[in-house]
Image (tube, rainbow, N blue to C red):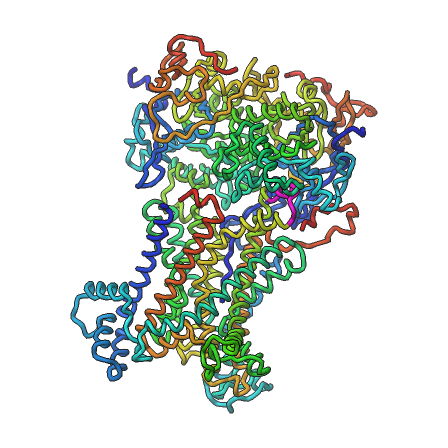
Amino acid sequence: MSGNVLEVSGLSVEYLMDGGSVLAVDNVSFSLEPGEFVAVVGESGCGKSTMLFAVAQLLTPPAEIIGGTVMFKGRNLVGLADDSLTAIRWKDLSVVMQSAMNALNPVKSIGAQFKDAMRAHGVTSAQEIATRSAEVLKMVSIDPAHLQSYPHQLSGGMRQRSMIAMALLFTPDLVIMDEPTSALDVVAQRSLMVQIKELQEQFGFAVIFVTHDMSLVSHFSDRLMVMYAGQVAEVGPTRQLFDAPQHPYTAGLMEAFPSIRGPKLPLAGIPGSPPNLARRAEGCWFAPRCPKVFDRCKIEPPPLYPVQGREVRCFLHDAAAPVLVPRSSEEAGDTI
Amino acid sequence: MRFALRRLGFFLLTLWAALTLNFVLPRLMPGNPAIAMISKFKGGVSPQALHTLEIQFGVFTHKPLLSQYFTYLGNMATGKYGVSLSEYPATVGQIIKNAIPWTLGLVGMTTILAFVLGTGIGIVGAWRRGGTLDSIMPPVFVITSVIPYFWLGLVLILLFAVKLHALPSFGSYFFQATPGFNLTFIWDVIQHAILPAATLLITTIGTWILTMRNTMITTLAEDYVRMARAKGLPNRRIMLDYAARNAILPNLTGFAMSLGFVLGGAILTEFVFNYQGVGYWLLAAVNNEDYPLMQALFLLITVAVLVAILLSDIATAVLDPRTRDAS
Amino acid sequence: MAFLIPSTATDAATPLELAELPELDQGPGRRQSPAIRALRRMGKAIRSNRKATWGAGLLLVFFLLALFPGLIARDDPSAIVYKASLGPSLHHLLGTTGLGQDMFAQIIWGTRPVLEIAFGVGIASTVIAMLIGVAAAYLGGFWDAVLNLLTDVLLVIPLFPLLIVIAGYLHNAGTLVMILVITFTGWSYTARQLRSQALSLRKRDFLEAARVRGERPIYIIVVEIIPTMTSLIVASFLTNALYAVLFSTSLQFIGLGDPSQVSWGTMLYNAENNEAFQTGQALWIIAPGLCIVALGAAFALLNYAFDEIGNPALRPIKRGRRREQAPRRSRVRERA
Amino acid sequence: MTATADPLLRTEGLSKHFRIGNTLSPRTLHAVDDVSFSIGEREIVALAGESGSGKSTIARLLAKIYRPTSGKVFFEGKSVSSMRSRRDRLRYSGLAPMVFQDPFASINPVFRVSHGVMRGLKLHRPELTSEQRLDEAKRVFEVVGLTPAADVLERYPHELSGGQRQRVGFAQALAMRPKLIIADEPVSMLDVSIRIGLLNLMAKLRDDEDVSILFITHDLASARYVADRLIVMYAGQIAETGPMEEVLVNPKHPYTQLLLSAAPDPRAPLGVGAATDRGEPPKVINPTPGCRFRWRCPIAIDACHTITPQLLPIADGHEAACHVAQSGAEVKAFG
């Protein structure tokens, strides 16, 4: 689709370590329409943050993109010269990071950091900078007087909101968010999510939102991408994934959330632990923890199969092969 | 404010500790060395000066220790450092007054130059991670930073004075020159300063380079640097305003703290080059058993370090809003 | 004689990406005691880091010289039996001194006192620093304030001038006096480092867990805290040893050592007093000086290397390692 | 209440204040203020609240890491602070051990994971021989699901995953034959796929090993999954307490309602726009009387600004510290 704001295809990232290399992001492809909200979920070490920074061209050694393209508004960002990238950054593509405490420069005031961003993109009038800075802070319901404040003087929630304000200085086409709410308490987390959604509806930017907490994005994202061991396990419309997960891992994740309302069901979670990416898997990465594993999973790595408008990396959905599992795949969604 | 008060308290305490060390040390040493000193200089010094010394070092006096101590503290507070024995009748104050400008000029300027230059090289080296500069820096400067000052001084003398006859190796100016504010004299002073300055520069710069490089590398991995790149800021701004400005903060304190080490090196350098500054006189006093001079110079050096720490505190407060708020 | 300040020894930072990845293969060591495991790790680290290999190699050479000087240099180092100021020859590898002693024998025999001082100060200062630093951190409150103030005051008083003053009163300081004086003045720097690490450990839950379990304070300090600080303790030893080498030779050079002792510092003192340069005896100054540099470098290289091993971010980056394998390499690695 | 009917653990007016600031401007941070609750036998009580609500301070008070500023803790009817002898204190620490939040920081990295269990056994059950200790260690490892126990005992912490390490924490506690385990956010740092396993383990310890658990958490959904009773804390005080389902279905305190409305729940219908509260829990420094939630509370009345509400029964076993709720009016602040 040519109307997409972002098209990632075959993106792979490797870490060079003393003992060899680790493939942290393995052949990831997806796309974003303008104004779309895509959530990327996965456990720690699944490569979701690395993937995000690879898209934003923000990786630092020892991480390195070893293949794939990131087409942003029709241009491949991978291998793009520094000055061309600089022109795109922030104006068209901005980033919000996990901990604002670490992502804001501790020795500069909020206003000075806003100013830096604007001046880097040719806004030189002090008047214009001041007006716009105050405007974006008001958008996230922070008193513009805090432009004079230093990061350590703000509360966690305010820091995070001022980061979002900074990301919206130029009304970009895409905002990349790396767990922006995970350092916050539930109440602040909820109000920030609502605010992000409101701003997104108001200004129409697309969002990639990385989180480890699937339940957080259930009401906010249009599409959901589940990652496991550096690969896409399942991707599709959020509601569909929640209602009928197709990949055993997605189904297991659903099983891992106790509910706050409704009948109390005994849940099983997923046995075992996330894999160590340094030890290469022969077949499917999820096989050791999978309740529906069969022989083929241990030998051959599964590709992504298209299933009813979604993509699922699981042999259960290989239409060409006979189903070898004892139970039918629909059972996975039963408990919901 | 509170922070400033606490720092002031700390400085006073340190100063008091140094004064007390001066008072206690000669009394602690086996066979109070001051006795030997006083009998050695008995003929050449006025009886009055001798008496002051007796109180200062606690010999031939029947006053109790505590009253000796307070008399001593009083003398120090009112600037009565006594006479120099080896340079009699010059007072300790006069010798120090003559020595300070030379040390301040040579050591002060070189140290600041080494810090600024070293920090700059460290910043650039870390920024160009993996470049040639970055890869040769650590081994080279680990080794230069362990070269003894005095030995490097000797080697430079051998090369540039003895073999090449290019530069003078003795004193702070040609001994027959008349000090004055004229080009000939200034040129003479500069020539004399080149070798000792080079010695200090080569041996101290490695520390600043490596320290800055290492903190800079740690800082470069911070989220706010990544964020600055995401914002599309010019590289120079990221390097200086985001990375270096944060990385330099711990090093400022480190700089002041290690000034004691640097001054130690300066003493040896002045000694090797017969450069008549504070360090030269300190060693001369030690060799001549001129204890009043030695004690006063030790105090002076301590005060110098304290002043440097004070300056670095101020610089840190200016650069770091968090320390400002904590006070 | 400037000092290497291991800036990162206390809190090694892990880049974001590394923290997200599972640990690489940890290697053997399952059934060994912690001490042996630590030694094995150290051995492996020394072999894998070139600076550490050089440092350890140099140190080993000096160690052997100090242990068996008689096997290498048969001449009596202090006997004035030869013609003065001979040039290097087969009989006198480095020539003779201006007084008529064999210079090679002096260098070899001079190794022992320097190493004695280095190890004496290194061990004594580290023990004091450890006791004071850990006690301050563990006891906290009043005792921490007192011990910390003591450390800070001693840290600020310029050490070398103080050393000169003390040595000036003492006259002719032999090995033992040197060790005592340098230890007395020099323990504060590493005490401060050890304290700050112990403080950060104190907040770690495993110590609280031990306390909740009902362990006694002395058990917690000796069994739970100190073994976890091994690397900083080693660094502390190396720092103190280096400082002892440089300061003791300097004191000897200015004539405050024991002039009858054969050591590198007194060789330099004698050389300077006999105007070695003017009499064409450059080797008399160059040889012992180079030895000091080499021994100092051994300690400093080891120290720096351990810093690198503890904090992988500091290690040298090998560029272009993957250039041929990955033609579509991203430009991200070349920021700057 | 007679002595035999004493609950397993009971606190009475428990407070912990920290002195901050300095001699020139002394200030007191009220981390925990006048907290009274009890835990019965074979019961999991969830203590929920946001960060800074004082819930972890309560854990540390119960574990005797902190000493209370005022108030008392009674264990099996006996005052814990009056336990002076080492024997008594050891006995208590064995009966009420603690499990920590961070699985990566709570086990000493230098030793094998057997270290903590074996030390605990040596201190608390000195009658066992070293073989018996090893057998017991194997037993508790099996109970918490670390199998094969003999193999896992020999490993180093870095060789285990976060979930496994947290199970080691429970095994260490279990080895002392406890009656109450104080679990301070035991699952909050674990990956979601692993959390349920630990929650199930906690239920199993209650059902099979007869252990009570004080489950400290910020996640109401996890609390609901395993706990029998719920205590909601706000700014160092108990806001509301009662049987789990009763409180969740029928929350009386505005703060509980806020927490419930903010909890993400994929199975709930879309509720965007509901929780628009932008406030944050306060740091309680030198407090004046009044409800601590009043600045965020949309239904605050005059009394809330002057009188600190007491925790009073609203329904059977259900208590709330809210003037409005206590007046009998219906509380509908959030959600």
Q: In this view, does B201 lie to the left or right of A333?
A: left
Residue at the extreme left:
B62
Residue D147 seen in render: no
Asked if residue B7 is positioned above or below residue B266 in the image, the reply reads above
Q: Where is residue C271 in the image (x, y as percent from the top left)?
A: 48, 82
Query: In terms of depth relative to the viewer, which is nearer, A175 or C49?
Result: A175
**In which image quadrant can residue C317 be found?**
bottom right
**In which image quadrant can residue D122 be found?**
top left
State the extent of the magenta-drawn residues as a range.
B225-235
Residue appearing at x 66%, y 49% in the figure: A19
Residue A2 seen in render: yes
Q: Where is residue B34 in the image (x, y as percent from the top left)?
A: 27, 75
Query: In terms of depth relative to the viewer, which is nearer, D148 or D229?
Result: D229
Q: Where is residue A327 in the image (x, y as percent from the top left)?
A: 72, 19
Asked if residue B160 is positioned above or below residue B77 in the image, the reply reads below
Residue appearing at x 32%, y 46% in the figure: C142
Q: For residue B226: magenta?
A: yes
Q: Where is residue C168 in the image (x, y as percent from the top left)?
A: 35, 73
